[in-house]
Image (cartoon, rainbow, N blue to C red):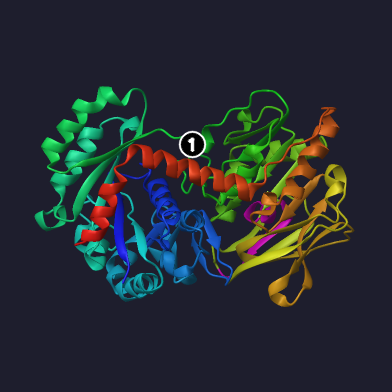
Amino acid sequence: MAMSIMIQGTMSNVGKSLITAGLCRIFRQDGYKCAPFKSQNMALNSFITKDGFEIGRAQAMQAEAAGIEPKSYMNPILLKPLEDCRSQVILNGEVLGNMSAKDYYKNKKKFIPYIMNSYNTLCEKFDIVVIEGAGSPAEINLNKDDIVNMGMARLARSPVLIVGDIDRGGVFAQLIGTVALLRKDEREFVKGLIVNKFRGNRDIFSSGVGILEKRSRKPVIGVVPYVKCDIDDEDSLSERFDGKNNGNGIYIAVVKLPRISNFTDFNAFETVDGVNLRYVESAGDFGNPDIIIIPGTKNTVGDLLWLRKNGIEDKIKQFAGDGKIVFGVCGGFQMLGKTIADYEGVERKGEYKGIGLLPVKTYFDRNKTRTRVEGEFTNIGGILSALSGVRFEGYEIHNGVSEIVGGFKNMCVLCNQILGGEKFFDGVNAGNVYGTYVHGIFDSENVIKTIVSAVMGKKGIAGSVKIRDMKSYKEEQFDLLADTLRQNIDINMVYKILREGM
């Protein structure tokens, strides 16, 4: 059976996912077969494996760091919030159904056999499993039925490292308080503390390390600096949302929908010199973008009504009328159509008028499309006409089937290899408005280069567009993360903790 180590945090967004990814990369560099695991994830950023199963984006990213193919058993339970107290439950990569928070918490211990089957599958295949927790283990009102923090540590008999975020302040209260709130038997699992996102001279914090160790009675095995590595984010706390337009080059505005999902679709744009990408959430915040992107969402109808209510829909129509590029991905594509019909109450029962910029009607049903795809653009018009013939690959995760209504000439066709190469309708464009169901479509080097070159040409910006090879770029970022952890964490102590186990 594999050795294991678990990364828990004092709260959400302290860096558990990145620490987990960094350790996965280190173990890979050191010659071990390593895999990530998270028993229960709550996120709207998800990923489709090659065999068509849905998992959290963070676990897919961590698998990349470990140099392995993402699999559904790395994240057996994925919760995708629909509303504040209701989520879609993904079990073993497939939709189980929608559940209220109350019903899920009442029944979640029934998922333990599925969790352990997935975990044991990893243990049989790998040397080391790095387990990630969720939120905080000190949510003492929920600990009785926990399956993702100390509950998972007990099930796996895994030693635990707890991560605190010094950048947000209160790291002493975070770490000492978390340890103090654990039961005595839970504290025995905690083998070390990590202070994350430290800025400045580490020597100044030496007394702080002493205080943490004395008060918590746990060793501080690392003080990790605030590392700027460009690795896929997972949740709505992402710092990517804080980006600003510097006024040079071309400007892409991504609508920050209330239930935005898979916003990692646009990370590739941020690696291109001369491209400014910013997330906007009010009509007065757009400025004068060259491209507006409406991203995916877990609540298409609800977010469409939000666009309508706060004036963003009118802003989008105005930009489209001015000949600017509007691009919708997945739920954003559905919104750009004429009608969304939800007769079965998948999201919100009824028929709703879309933004009306694409001749498409979408019908929601309870079947969920989950597939990897590859294909090419065909017959593309408007500013992005040079996309015609350009190949791409990506994945689809959506409820709903869209069909063209009325006369229409231009069409984006996908070639789905899973269906034996059969071509099928999967997106359209009308003028300078474009829509597709494909997530990751901008990750293809030729796609992003063609888009940026076309827009720069339209604006009269001279010069060639330099595109980073995304695969090599990701590898560099994982290595940067691993190097930072090696320099600031006692890796020998980590290996000692692994070998001793529980």
Quadrant of the image occupied by residue 391 = bottom right
Q: Amino acid at mark 1?
A: Glu
Q: In this picture, is 308 found above or below 211?
A: below
On whether residue 148 falls in the magenta region, the answer is no
Q: Residue at x 45, y 42 (%)?
A: 481
Task: Report the residue that reaches farthest toward the front.
Answer: 31
Q: Which residues are magenta?
A: 330-344
Q: Residue at x 54, y 60 (%)?
A: 47
Q: In this picture, is 490 found above or below 20?
A: above
On whether residue 342 falls in the magenta region, the answer is yes
Q: Secondary structure at mark 1?
A: helix
The quadrant in which the N terminus is found is: bottom left
Residue 249 x, y percent position in the rendering? 73, 27
Q: Is residue 245 left or right of residue 165?
A: right
Q: Is residue 98 visible?
A: no
Residue 316 x, y percent position in the rendering? 71, 39
Residue 30 x, y percent position in the rendering? 41, 54
Mark 1 closeness class: few <14, some 14–19, many ≥20 residues within 10 Å? few
Q: Residue at x 63, y 55 (%)?
A: 331
Q: In this picture, is 426 found above or below 203?
A: below
Residue 274 x, y percent position in the rendering? 71, 30
Q: Which residue is mark 1?
A: 239
In the image, 64 versus 336, the foreground residue is 64
